[in-house]
Amino acid sequence: MLILVLIFSYAAVFMLIMAFMPVQENRPTLGVLGLTPNLKKKKGPFDGIRKIAVIMKPVVKGDFRKRYVKDLATARWGITPEEFMLLKIILIVGSLFLTFPAIGPDAMFIWIMLSLAVGYVLPEFMLKSRIKKVKDRIVKELPDAIDLLALCVNAGLDFMLSLKWVVDKSPPSVMIDELNTVLQEINVGKTRREAIKDLSLRYELPDLSTFARTLIQADKMGTSMTEALNILAEDMRQARFRRGEQVALKAPMKMLIPLLLFIFPVVGILVAGPILLDFIQNNPFQNLAGG
């Protein structure tokens, strides 16, 4: 029971903090490395957290900081590594404060160690889950974006005008945000190859790498961008169809557990219930014994 109290306390504190953290704009402009998003600050009681997060700078540095910069940018949470580490500390302290009345003095040390462990693991787990969700959205949205690019190029627009048209006319989404980032990076001086390559490096997805590699090779070799995009669009549609088939093949296995846990027991009760009741009321063995 105490474990459940601790888990729900962690979840409550974490969600409360995340509710007041800055959020990323629909169409962010990343920096030269594509890793520092513009933030839209929320006004609220947690504004002070962002100001005191600088105390974590001596702890969050070097390769450790670079990893969190990349992960947090990919997750699109709109917080800095310092704020993320401070969030962990607040999570640990806040949950201990909430659960302190339920903790006996004998279990205090074990409880603190457990709080330290869970306080570190829970934000990491939520960060990884968020990154996976963002990557899944990109994989889902990429074929449609490529189709639009191919349509614009086939209509006679060059690649840059096609990219701008897709960004301007499409509803906000993760993939459109990233294409907007590519467009803005090119406008501030990056070459088209560098901007597209950085896009693939930010997420390290096979589909996105294929997209970037195809465009870079077409640009480098001087081949027709129209032909390259048409071939790529067809490949992406086939890949999406194959993924749909794989999901469909896994569906029966996923349905098996609910069937075993919920459907079969109910069917068994409906079928065997009347038979058992009749057997109990008219026990033939009892009649034989009485005879």
Image (cartoon, grey):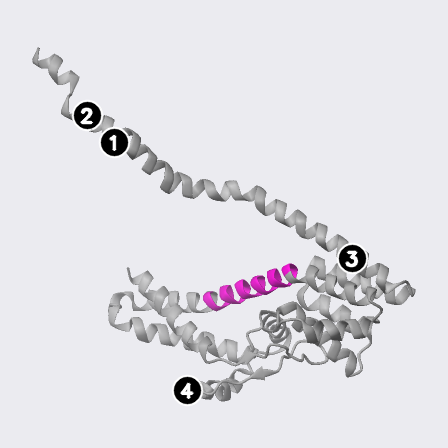
The picture places residue 282, in percent across and down from the top left corner, at 15, 21
Residue furthest to the front in view is 155
The first of marks 1 and 2 along the sequence is: 1
**Res. 278 mark:** 2
The first of marks 2 and 3 along the sequence is: 3
Residue drawn at (43%, 42%), measured in percent from left and top? 257
Q: Which residue is mark 1?
A: 273
Q: Which residues are magenta?
A: 122-140
**Res. 232 mark:** 3
Mark 3 falls on what kind of element? helix
Specify few, some or many for label 4: CA neighbours under 10 Å numbering under 14, 14-19, or 20 or more: few
Q: Is residue 85 above or below residue 139?
A: below
**Res. 94 mark:** none
Tally of marks: 4
The foreground one among 20 and 168 is 168
The first of marks 3 and 4 along the sequence is: 4
The picture places residue 212, in percent across and down from the top left corner, at 77, 64
The picture places residue 211, in percent across and down from the top left corner, at 76, 61
Residue 110: which quarter of the image?
Answer: bottom left
Q: Is residue 128 left or right of residue 33?
A: left
Mark 1 falls on what kind of element? helix
Which callout, 1 or 4, points to the residue nearer the camera?
1
* Dominant secondary structure of the residues highlighted in magenta in the image: helix
